[in-house]
Amino acid sequence: MKAAEVLVFCTLAIILTSMNVQGQCCGEPEEVIEPVGIDTVVIDNEQFWTGSKLVNGSLLINETLELRDCDLTISGEGIKILENGSLHLVNSSISPFLREVGYYIESSGVLEIHRSTINGSLDHSNQYFSLYLLDGSFSFVDSIMTRSGLIRSGLDSLEIINSTISGIISTGGSILVEDSVVEGLGASMVGEGNLSVIRTSFTSNISFSSSIAAISCEDGGLDVENVYIEGTYGGGIFSSGASVSARSVTIDLPGALYGGRFMECGPLELVGMDITGPYSGIEMTDCPGDPMIRDSKILSLYKGIDTKGPGALLIENTTIEDAENGIISSNHISIRGSSIRNTEVGLLLEGQWALIEMDCQIENFTRWGMEIETWDRVERTDVAFIPGDGALSNISMWGRTHINTYGPGMEVVDGSIIELSSSLNWTTKIGPGEVGLIWGYLGPSDEVITVEYDLSASWGNARMETSFIVMEDSHVDLQLPLTDIYVNDIELMEGNAVVTVGTYGSEAKNVAVTIYLDGTYRFSQKTNIVPGENITIILPVGKMEPGQHDLKCSIRSSDEYTGMNGILQDNNELTISVEKGEDTDDNELQIIAAIILIIAVVLIIMVLVLRRRS
């Protein structure tokens, strides 16, 4: 259909719809959409539009176009604002002609959207974005984006004021989001600018937002104040290499990865954080200066605060609840006027920790109040400990121990499973390598009680056990009796392969014994093999042509450790050479038998004849 025909069709459809609506509304007249051009409409002189307009194609703006009290419908790919162009929306809206077909807006000039609505905007070629801000200026005030994608900006600065948007990404400058609602993928900034988010809420039910943060800032500066975050975001706030100030922030993300994650950020100040539900409350890595968390409340699943690297962290007037580990720290830390409640371990200190100040109450912990990496006895008299049910001690000391597993040839066994249990009434499964273990804890009379561990290592059916007491610089090595299956013998007897197989080390179950003739599969059978016993199995080979052949037996079992380079499999195959003689043809045998029979009959007749003559 030609463009002109489309225009006529659309106009008639709108007129008919209008007439139908008029009939339903007591005869009140409704304005008919006025079509504007066909195909691409070029604005190269100043224009003012009002009422209902239909652009039957795309819109190219090279001058000033103002939409005031205007409802613009567009059927083409989108709207492009050139370097000399400007588009002003006041009390207006832009919508696609068909609901399921979106459009985009690309601006290199001036784009101002005030008290207006961008509806159904989505780029056909990249269905994340709606607005592309390449150059010029942009403002979005008292306006709404609905059923649309993200704003992507390369501008030096832009502002979103008292508006609702799906999300925004800036790759070149600063962003201010104030008194607004973000309903999609959040606000992100990459570059040297500043991301400021003030009195704004973030909510998302988009499934693929689970891997990103509501607010993300790399480099530059991040300023967040009076912000509420909920929905399916993977994290609340993420920042890397930026200065950060966050005040009065509520993050409600059950099941998310983290509330706040900060890497190499400084200065860093978090005040009035209220975090509920994520796996980790606040994570800090290599944040220089003196980061601070004050007047906050954190309810997380696994760890409340996790801090590592340089810097002296101050935690003040803060409550941490319901986490498995209240605080995990490997750097300098001071705690003032704070409490840690309902945890398994209240405070876990590791690495090059330094506990500068400790004005804290640790209550209702179920294992240790404090767990400290040290090989020396530790006491703390400036902490109020209130143990919960099942608590073992207020303070425990732990160190790093190496646990390694080897095979019969002392090769390292990858993927072995190590199970540790002790008098501490807990059992855990780990892999080989370095592991932190409690070596002692304070008893009822503040005496140090050492801990003995039972260790069981396994790979497949191979298993080895030992007991040990953790010592400084200790190594625990276990040699596993790994399963090593082998083919002992193979021979050909009456068209069958007679094979003998066995195993060293541990029992092998469901061993597949397979016969190949000249590299071609013939037959397979599964069996169990016990160490020290050879098993003989008869497998049919099938038809063989006369001549020399290679007869191979191959065995495989998931219980056999093969390592990275196929270790222990040199004896899993055996090949012998067999010879098949010429077969006598059945027809020839029949002919020979017939000749013999005839000769026999002739001889009998001759004998009878001779007797009669005699």
Image: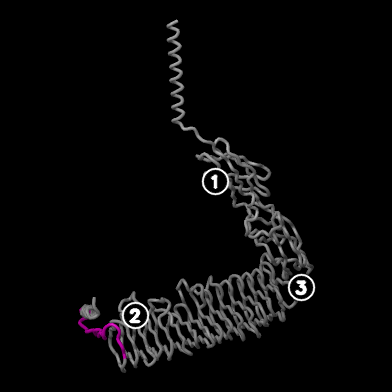
Circle nearer the viewer, 1 or 2: 1
In the rendered image, which residue does mark 3 sit on?
378
Using the image, tell me which numbered label, if any, was put on residue 516. 1
Q: Nearer the viewer, residue 224 or 442?
A: 224
**Which residue occupies 55% across, 84% down?**
248
Q: Position of residue 260 (x, y in %)?
A: 57, 78
On whether residue 65 falls in the magenta region, the answer is no
Q: Is residue 421 above or below residue 220?
A: above
Would you call the spot at circle 1 few (<14 residues within 10 Å), some (14-19), or many (20 or more)?
A: some
Determine the image quadrant of residue 162.
bottom left
Q: Is residue 92 above or below residue 436?
A: below
In the rendered image, which residue does mark 2 sit on?
77
Q: Amino acid at mark 3?
A: Val
Sooner in the amino-acid sequence: mark 3 or mark 2:
2
- What is the secondary structure assignment of the residue under circle 2? loop
Q: Amino acid at mark 1?
A: Tyr
Task: Examine the rendering and report whether any part of residue 520 can be seen.
Answer: yes
